[in-house]
Amino acid sequence: MSLVSRRAVLGGSLAALSIAAAPKPARAGAVTVEVGYVPFVTIAQLFVIAEEGWAKEAGIDLKPVRFSSGPALIQAVASGKFEATYCAVSPVTVARAAGVDLKIVATNGIESVSLVAGGPLSDAFGKAKSPAEAFALFKSAHGRPAKLGALPKGTIPDSALRFYLEANGVPASDTEILGQGEEQVRQALLAKAIDGAAMPEPVISIALAKDPTARVVANGRQLLPGQPGFVLSLRESFIKAHPEAARTLVALNDRATELIKTDPQRAVKSVLKHLGRGLIPEDVLLTALTSPYNPVSSDPNLILASTEQLQDFQVRIGAQSRAIPNDELFDLSFYNALKGGR
């Protein structure tokens, strides 16, 4: 069976009509926007905007800068760098709690982090009736806790994984969570240096393609229902200085979302230039882009309740100093105006 999902083979005429009908923002003037990002398929919108030339057409000089993890990116933002970020919700909430003036203006997707396991841990889940039993079976058989990869503490992969383990009554002694950068987690998973990983795409599809024992043992909804995913955030100072550019970026993010949904084979060309680097085959990236583990959406209204729940958990585990009210964390005005109000 082909690795490519049904979304990848939608008719070209339908895709062309959908993109032609997508909102096309007015020119915002020559505005330079340095955007820090963490390299996952879950922020494919950024790659599409950059490679399709839409930002340039709209009068925006987009300058993407790559980071290995959200905390590393937010540290740079806290020092005064970048007008925009594409990363998971958690680092943004942590930064906002620390006084950084970021506002979430759009999403890229929801429930985008899943737990994939390989080898003995995958086998244990196949035999067990619950996650707690699976981890107990693994520890009993191997004399050690299961090693689980995630991004550093304070990120969505780390927090969603911890939420899942706690909610399912898994004792802390039955797991060891290792926080690393995206490439380190991917390499460790393929080398079987870890037993599983809570990560977004393309790590999931790469593991499934290269390791016949690998399988998703908990999807995004099972980790944290309504799990907020990766988002586009802008500095408040940038929004105030360049409101038309901010509006344009939100419109472009939505336009890119529609392209990903309707013509993923076109969109993946842009993703390949930023994520492939000759190491990830295009067909695997296409699988990741159209994966059921990568639900695509640009609507920030969808993650309001789950972001509150996530923040409460992060405060409780010490990953965040305080919970930020939604009206302080989000600016929904651009998206809601684009969609004709709410």
Image: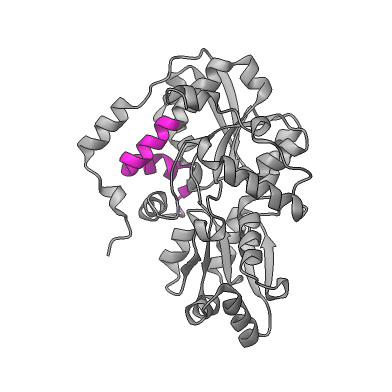
Residue at the image position 49 percent from the left and 21 percent from the top: 248
Magenta span of residues: 254-278
Residue at the image position 50 percent from the left and 80 percent from the top: 123
Residue at the image position 68 percent from the left and 80 percent from the top: 144
Specify the quadrant of the image occupied by residue 284: bottom left
For residue 261: magenta? yes
State whether residue 336 is above or below residue 261.
above
Q: Is residue 249 visible?
A: no
Q: Position of residue 177 (x, y in %)?
A: 68, 65
Residue at the image position 51 percent from the left and 12 percent from the top: 29
State whether residue 18 is above or below residue 28.
below
Q: Position of residue 105 (x, y in %)?
A: 56, 30
In screen coordinates, is 305 left or right of 212? right
Location of the N terminus by quadrant is bottom left
Q: Position of residue 13 (x, y in %)?
A: 20, 35
State whether residue 238 is above or below residue 299.
above
State the residue lying farthest toward the top: 29
Q: Position of residue 92 (x, y in %)?
A: 66, 39
Count of marks, rendered view: 0
State the residue lying farthest toward the bottom: 141
State whether residue 131 is above or below residue 11.
below
